[in-house]
Image: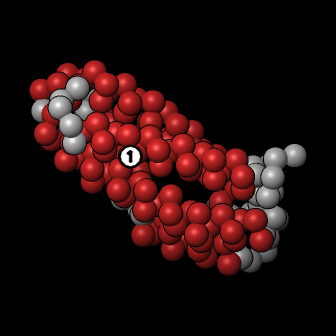
Amino acid sequence: MHSLMNLINDHEALHKMAHDILALTCGKPDPAAGYEMLTTFGKRLEAHFLDDADFLYDDPTCTRPTSLDDAVRKVESAFAELKTRWRTYRTQWSADNIAQDWEGFAQDSAAIMHRILDRIAQENAVLYPLALQHSRIRLRAA
């Protein structure tokens, strides 16, 4: 079972990595660093999406939806485009494309990173407290 503390630590790491990418793209072009940071961030984010899927979605032992299930549906609806946008962004921004269009990479990175940070904020404020309340996660690691 996942713990709230580990999930928050993961969010803090993702938050820092997103801001590092944003800071890098505001400076002098460094395509190699941009691609490396994007790849590292992508692996961490995709692992995080999988971790969330372990506990956020419907509990098969419940006969009717809980407040967590309702909140998950609302957040998923609000961020329905994010996973598709993320896949498109990751596919588009290869090492060669970043080197050829640093400004475009910077603009796209700003848009997607801010959207990801918004999603993380919703998980922290809404979904994780409800997941804890509904015993789908623990407060601390076992």
Nearest the viewer among 81 and 94 is 94
| Residue occupying the point 31% across, 25% down | 33
Place of residue 127 in the rendered image (x, y in percent of width and height, measured from the top left): 62, 67
| Residue occupying the point 38% across, 46% down | 19
Mark 1: secondary structure: helix
Place of residue 89 in the rendered image (x, y in percent of width and height, measured from the top left): 29, 41
Residue 71 in view here: yes
Amino acid type, callout 1: His
- How many marks on residues? 1
Residue 65 in view here: no
Place of residue 14 in the rendered image (x, y in percent of width and height, measured from the top left): 50, 45
- Please tell me how crowded label 1 is: few (under 14), some (14-19), or many (20+) other residues with Cα within 10 Å: some
| Residue occupying the point 19% across, 47% down | 107
Above or below 84: residue 131? below
Nearest the viewer among 29 and 56 is 29
Nearest the viewer among 23 and 113 is 23
Question: Which residue in the protein does label 1 denote?
Answer: 19
Q: Decide if residue 26 is on the left or right side of residue 48.
A: left
Q: Decide if residue 14 is on the left or right side of residue 7.
A: left
Q: From this viewpoint, which residue is outermost toward the right? A: 142
